[in-house]
């Protein structure tokens, strides 16, 4: 019963649209007031209060697309509520005039939110929804990529120059590890010393003024959609839509 209810909720949320109501000049001051209030509450980490302020804007302007986008960001990155995050990203995309610069971001966040929500649902017998199976498969593939990256990092670590010989416990007399006398110890020639290798699969980049995560992806990879890989490499990045000049990113 719980699984059926969850699926119905997802279906109902994602099928909701965004209205096409005009902007009344008399509402402008109220919209600006709620917008400033939402930003202040967010800075104070009152995330629920910030969401309420954005919802007040939507009541005045149902087609104010950025309010849906910001609500989606808060639910996803600050509250880990992936169902409501997916709902608001979908509302943003269904608006009549969504911010063109945020459309691709919203699509990517929507897919990630769906994956996160699918991963949070317990795996029970009889769970055969094709969409849920697809989401679980994609989520498993994402986890596999992360594990592969971890293994690659381990492989690139330098191996020790010499390993200790195993003891022969069949003869107690040999259990004492012999140590070469100081006179016989020879320094390792500089040419044969093993130096740690610096991983070549990633580097850092300091954000410049006016740059966004998509423009950085296009600059280094020639593909704006590569912003998702930058997100994975920077798990502490809370709001990729607001990068700060001088902020250091890891580029995979």
Image (cartoon, rainbow, N blue to C red):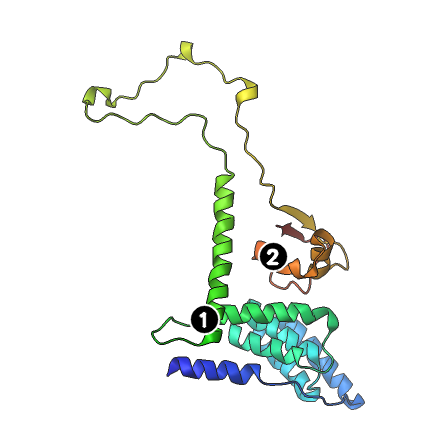
Where residue 211 appears, x then y in whole percent? 74, 58
Q: Is residue 87 toward the left or the right of residue 139 in the image?
A: right
Q: Residue furthest right?
A: 25
Q: Which mark is residue 112?
A: none
Residue on which the image places disc 1: 133
Q: Nearer the viewer, mark 2 or mark 1?
A: 1
Q: Is residue 62 toward the left or the right of residue 164 in the image?
A: right
Q: Is residue 43 toward the left or the right of residue 126 in the image?
A: right
Judging depth in this view, the residue of 221 and 97 nearest the camera is: 221
Quadrant of the image occupied by residue 43: bottom right
Residue at image coords 51%, 60%: 142
Position above or below: 172 against 201: above
Q: Which mark is residue 229?
A: 2
Where residue 128 appears, x then y in whole percent? 41, 75
Judging depth in this view, the residue of 193 and 243 nearest the camera is: 193
Mark 2 or mark 1: which comes first in sequence? 1
């Amino acid at each position: 019963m719980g699984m059926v209810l969850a699926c119905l909720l997802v279906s109902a949320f994602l099928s909701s649209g965004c209205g096409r109501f005009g902007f009344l000049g008399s509402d402008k001051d109220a919209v600006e007031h709620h917008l400033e209030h939402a930003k202040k509450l967010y800075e104070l980490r009152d995330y629920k209060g910030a969401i309420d302020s954005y919802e007040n804007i939507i009541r005045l302007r149902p087609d104010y697309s950025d309010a849906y986008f910001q609500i989606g960001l808060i639910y996803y990155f600050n509250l880990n509520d992936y169902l409501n995050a997916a709902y608001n990203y979908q509302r943003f995309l269904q608006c009549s005039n969504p911010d063109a610069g945020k459309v691709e971001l919203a699509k990517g966040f929507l897919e990630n939110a769906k994956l996160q929500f699918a991963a949070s649902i317990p795996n029970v017998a009889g769970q055969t929804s094709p969409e849920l199976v697809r989401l679980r498969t994609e989520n498993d593939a994402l986890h596999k990529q992360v594990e592969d990256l971890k293994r690659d990092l381990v492989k690139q670590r330098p191996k020790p120059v010499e390993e200790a010989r195993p003891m022969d416990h069949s003869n107690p007399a040999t259990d004492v590890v012999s140590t070469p006398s100081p006179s016989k110890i020879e320094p390792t020639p500089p040419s044969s010393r093993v130096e740690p290798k610096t991983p070549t699969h990633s580097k850092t980049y300091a954000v410049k003024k006016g740059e966004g995560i998509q423009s950085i992806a296009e600059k280094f990879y020639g593909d704006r959609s590569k912003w998702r890989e930058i997100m994975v490499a920077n798990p502490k990045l809370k709001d990729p839509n607001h990068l700060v000049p001088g902020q250091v990113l890891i580029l995979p």
